[in-house]
Structures are given as C-alpha cells and as structure tokens.
Image (cartoon, grey):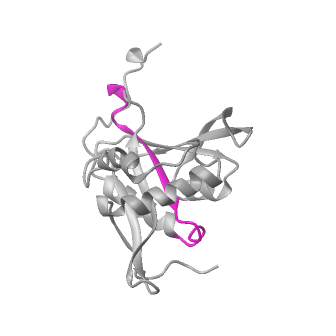
Amino acid sequence: MSRIPTEVQVRPGSEADLEAVTAIYNHYVRETALTFDTTAFTPAERLPWLRSHPEDGPFRLLVASHISPSRNAPEVLGYATSSPYRPKAAYSTSVEVSAYCAPGTTGRGVGTLLYKALFEALAGEDIHRAYAAIAQPNEPSVRLHGAFGFRHVGTYTEVGRKFGRYWDVSWYEKPMLSRTGPSASPDPSRTPR
C-alpha cells in the first residue's frame, strides 16, 4: 500500500474546493452506508455547509491536497470537519468531527494527516469534547479515531436504513483541553435530572 505523497498540504477549505469536497462526499452518499444521506448533492446545495466552516473558531473545514502530476493542478485528497454537535446552547463546547478521503486515497495516511491538523487547529478553542459517529462496520475509521484518543461510548442499533438494510452507528468521544472553559468538574447538585 503506497503512502500519501510527501508534498501534501493541509489548509483551510475554501469555495475553490467546493466541487472536489462535494464529489468526495457524494461518493460516500452513493456507494456506502458511511453517511446516511441518500441523495447526492450539487455543489450549490453544499455551499451553505462549506460557509458554515470558517477559517477560525470551533467549526473548521480542512482540506488535504497536492499537485497532481498528471494534471499539474491541485487535487483534493480528502477533508476533515468539526461541526456543531447539537444546536442547543449548552452543547456549544462540543463538536462532531468527521473525515472523508477521496476514493483511492483511503489507507494511505490522509485521514491521519487531516485529523492531526484539525486537532492542532482546535487546541486553542473553547471545546470540551469531540464526538464521532461511525456507521458500522467501519474498522478503518474505528482505528483512526482510536489513534487520536477517542473511546467508544455507545451504539445506536439499526438506527438508519440505507440500501435496503438497517445500520448501527457507534459513538466515540474524545476529551479536549479547553483553554477558556472551566477546568473543574461540574457541581453534581446542578446535574440535570
């Protein structure tokens, strides 16, 4: 198995990447149960999603690219995101992360490179936990998340139906070192019941 080219650059995603990241995501929509979207998107439909991931702050889009020798132009190899975990205000210090690699680049270290850069970028943000939802089975994703300190916290069984069958989704959690949030454990008397 070949590794990623040494000249791969990880950088914030931009509107110039919209077609490439949409094509990567659509591959997983059409060909796999790794996402539960069932209809492919146009780039225009994905534009609001891209714009919801600015260059700074807790919600990021990072893109791995390199110059393709055959086209002498940048080629997007994959992308990683941190997105809001849930819309309610109390969830604001939690993010959901994901990484998608272009077909033919999986297993070559692109996801590792993207997550390394993503977690470095998020280190200064007010984030207490990162979560990942992994449709099962997906051992490569489980290994990737485990390598970054995620632990399994639960599984929703048969939570989604795609391609005529039901799929489980396992949730993984990673503690983050929030530099601006409270450092002590919450007061147990204030725990919601």
Residue 38 point in image, percent of width and height: 59, 42
The quadrant holding residue 133 is top right
Furthest residue toward top:
193
Residue 89 within the segment the image draws in magenta: yes
Residue 8 visible? The answer is no
Residue 132 within the segment the image draws in magenta: no
Note whether 81 is above or below 160 in the view shown. Answer: below
The residue shown at (63%, 39%) is 169
Q: Which residues are magenta?
A: 88-109
Q: Nearer the viewer, residue 177 or 75?
A: 75
Q: How many marks?
A: 0
Residue 92 point in image, percent of width and height: 33, 33
The residue shown at (28%, 37%) is 181
Left or right, residue 109 beside residue 57: right
Residue 130 point in image, percent of width and height: 44, 44
Left or right, residue 103 beside residue 5: right
Q: Nearer the viewer, residue 185 or 102?
A: 102
Q: Nearer the viewer, residue 58 or 54?
A: 54
Quadrant in which the N terminus appears:
bottom right
Left or right, residue 142 beside residue 51: right
Residue 166 visible? The answer is yes
The residue shown at (32%, 37%) is 183
Residue 145 point in image, percent of width and height: 55, 54
